Amino acid sequence: MATEERRKVLVLLGPTAVGKTKLSLAIAKAYGAEIISGDSMQVYRGMDIGTAKISQTEMEGIPHHLIDIHDPKDAYSTAEFQEQGRRLIEEISSRGKLPFIVGGTGLYIESLCYGFRFSEAVADEAFRKEQEDYADEYGALALHARLAAVDPVSAERLHPNDRRRIIRALEVFHQTNITQSDSLAGQKKESPYDLCLVGLTMDRKILYKRIEDRIDAMLADGLISEVKGLLDQGYDRSLVSMQGLGYKEIAAYLAGELTMDEAVTLLKRDTRRFAKRQMSWFRHMKDIQWIDVDAEPSFDEQIEKFNEFIANSFSKGL
């Protein structure tokens, strides 16, 4: 497909708590964009506080897609996000609007922007059961160590509690003798879209302080009640959704396994580590133009920088 025929797609990415939401709204208004959420947790209904989900009021009338589309009992996959994202890019473009991907889940965003092909390894139920049994007997860290031994790059990306994705990465290697990370890295990263990718970054100490302040605000806003309500509805702690940051720590507190102080300390630590993993993923992506929030401290300066990137990125302008 010729460059001039490719759909224009705008992307804003960055670690949790860096300030993507406020900037995305201003940019969406300025360019007539519709936002596609690139967040692996905001797809789940009823999980609002712990995911820092934007409210209908905060959307200010700007269409947001791929939010509140899944029940927490149903795991959501990268392949599903890619398929739905492709469809939305076509639909939004056909309306004369600009598709605008906003989020922090690097694999989701990169898979959509560059059309990743996912492993053809089929489900091996016997192998999966073997890994599940191993994790049940020896724990999440032992299963994670199995992955680290054969695919350290994927292990770095995946949290030890993300059992489903860890087992899938092990399954891919078991069937193909090629690691999932090598499979992704070896793919030709040529986008079917006319892309403008913008990333937000800031001093790590400042980001970590923002993360901790956000968690304090979540607790004040009722995170404990939200988690309790999900558990009361029968959503088991082993679900992929309930392994999300904020949910697994508070669920452990409610089960009496942690004190409140221990749960909050663990949540803040794991969220800081998650932000670090996000930045590690983004650094290996190509074509990202970075806005250093410290260097451009005012909101107007950030918008001006974003406008400059847009003007210089799309092949034929907007």
Image: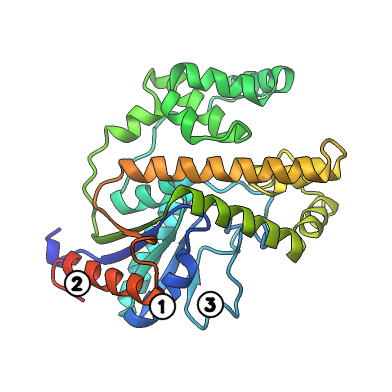
Q: Which quadrant is the N terminus positioned in?
A: bottom left
> Closer to the camera, 208 or 167?
208
Amino acid type shown at disc 1: Ala
- Return the residue nearer the eye: 228 or 216: 216
Secondary structure under tag 2 reads helix
Q: Secondary structure at mark 1?
A: helix
Which image quarter: residue 296? bottom left
Image vertical order of residue 32 relative to residue 51, above or below? below
Q: Nearer the viewer, mark 2 or mark 3?
A: 2
Task: Tell which circle, 1 or 3, labels the residue nearer the N-terminal end.
Answer: 1
Examine the rendering and report whether any part of residue 215 can be seen: yes
Mark 2 residue type? Ala
Residue 311, numbered label: 2
Q: Which mark is residue 59?
A: 3
Q: Residue furthest right?
A: 256
Tell me if mark 2 has few (under 14), some (14-19) or many (20+) residues whose alpha carbon lies within 10 angstroms of its own.
some
